[in-house]
């Protein structure tokens, strides 16, 4: 009888172990299905060393200087000093999630709002997507996966090394928007981000402003854009084109998030033009930049 009981006990243990192994395999399989391309979505991001390293050296992280929840930063490496100075104001390990929202410059890909599970490899180390949030955006049909577009989009990639330097523990939610994204869908995206934001979240609008104009014409247009931002004039912003900002819908979406978060006081930190940054007095085609903190 004792021998029979021992055999039965062994059979039961074997059965339980089998169930555990099968369950674990199922969980692993489902996890992989949630991010079907995660294994392959790697991109090497290189910086312009002449611009990037002097900028982060000049502006080391200075945690606690600002309580800004929402930023607007350029995505042109010529403006590296502006990006570094802006990020240094809110730097720190406390930031765990960074949303980078920028234009889809090619205006192509899987959908009008695109995201993807990506890992960026930089000289400072790897930066991973916030895979849970990225997948939730897809499951709620707010965004479509397109790793090819995300990994090719400089409105995201330009900022990644700066994120790694100033927010070393952060994961990134990359979002790029079609130029003709409608205000209603943009509002739904803003509501989603607001609903998930907490004290460890930072939202960055990746934007360059007036394009292809002389530095004098750009200066005039920038005054109009600045006033629209100060007034939170969404109708005016949606009416602009790339003579004023490269993605009006991105600007409006980021401002909507700032308003929902109670960060409705834009602080215009710096304003510059590519002509000045390149030490050229006046050119026929230039790009202008604002760095802005919303508090």
Image (cartoon, helix red, strand yellow):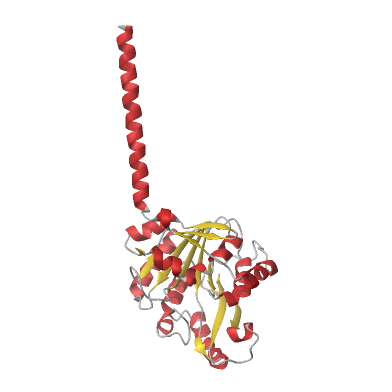
- Residue drawn at x 37%, y 49% is 32
**In this view, 38 is above or below 26:** below
Q: How many marks?
A: 0
- Horizontal side, residue 118 vs residue 283: left or right: left
Point out the image quarter for the C terminus. Answer: bottom right
Quadrant assignment, res 106: bottom left
In the displayed structure image, the side of residue 143 where residue 58 appears, left or right = right
Q: Position of residue 204 (x, y in %)?
A: 51, 68
Question: Residue 59: percent from the left, percent from the top?
Answer: 67, 68
- 161 and 47: which one is in front? 47
Please name the residue shown 38% across and 72% down the image.
186
Position of residue 51 relative to residue 92, above or below, is below
Residue 132 appears in the rendering: no
In the current view of this chain or complex, which residue is farthest to the top? Answer: 1
Dividing the picture into quadrants, the one containing residue 248 is bottom left
- On the rendered structure, is 205 left or right of 89? left
Q: Is residue 247 visible?
A: yes
Q: Nearer the viewer, residue 122 or 178?
A: 122
- Quadrant for the N terminus, please: top left
Name, please, the residue furthest toward the right.
Answer: 58
Residue for point 33% across, 7% down: 2
Q: Is residue 9 placed above or below 273 in the rendered structure?
A: above
Q: Position of residue 79 (x, y in %)?
A: 59, 76
> In terms of image quadrants, where is residue 235?
bottom left
Residue 16: x %, y % from top left? 33, 27
């Amino acid at each position: 009888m004792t021998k029979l009981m021992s055999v039965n006990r062994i059979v039961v243990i074997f059965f339980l172990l089998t169930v555990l192994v099968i369950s674990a395999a199922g969980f692993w399989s489902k996890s992989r299905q949630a991010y079907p391309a995660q294994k392959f979505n790697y991109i090497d991001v290189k910086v312009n060393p002449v611009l990037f390293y002097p900028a982060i050296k000049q502006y080391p992280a200075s945690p606690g200087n600002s309580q800004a929840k929402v930023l607007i930063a350029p995505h042109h490496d010529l403006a590296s000093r502006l990006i570094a100075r802006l990020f240094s104001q809110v730097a720190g390990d406390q930031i765990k999630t960074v949303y980078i929202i920028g234009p889809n410059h090619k205006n192509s890909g899987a959908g009008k709002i695109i995201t993807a599970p990506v890992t960026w490899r930089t000289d400072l180390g790897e930066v991973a997507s916030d895979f849970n949030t990225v997948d939730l955006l897809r499951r709620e049909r707010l965004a479509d996966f397109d790793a090819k577009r995300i990994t090719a989009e400089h409105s995201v990639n330009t900022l990644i090394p700066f994120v790694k330097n100033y927010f070393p523990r952060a994961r990134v939610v990359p979002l790029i928007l079609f130029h003709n994204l409608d205000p209603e869908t943009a509002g739904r995206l803003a509501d989603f981000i607001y609903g998930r934001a907490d004290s460890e979240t930072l939202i960055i609008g990746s934007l360059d402003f007036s394009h292809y104009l002389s530095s004098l014409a750009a200066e005039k247009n920038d005054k109009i854009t600045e006033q629209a931002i100060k007034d939170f004039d969404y109708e005016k912003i949606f009416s602009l084109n790339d003579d004023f900002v490269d993605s009006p819908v991105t600007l409006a979406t980021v401002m909507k998030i700032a308003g929902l978060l109670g960060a409705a006081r834009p602080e215009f930190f710096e304003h510059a033009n590519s002509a000045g940054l390149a030490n050229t007095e006046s050119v026929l085609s230039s790009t202008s930049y604002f760095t802005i903190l919303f508090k």
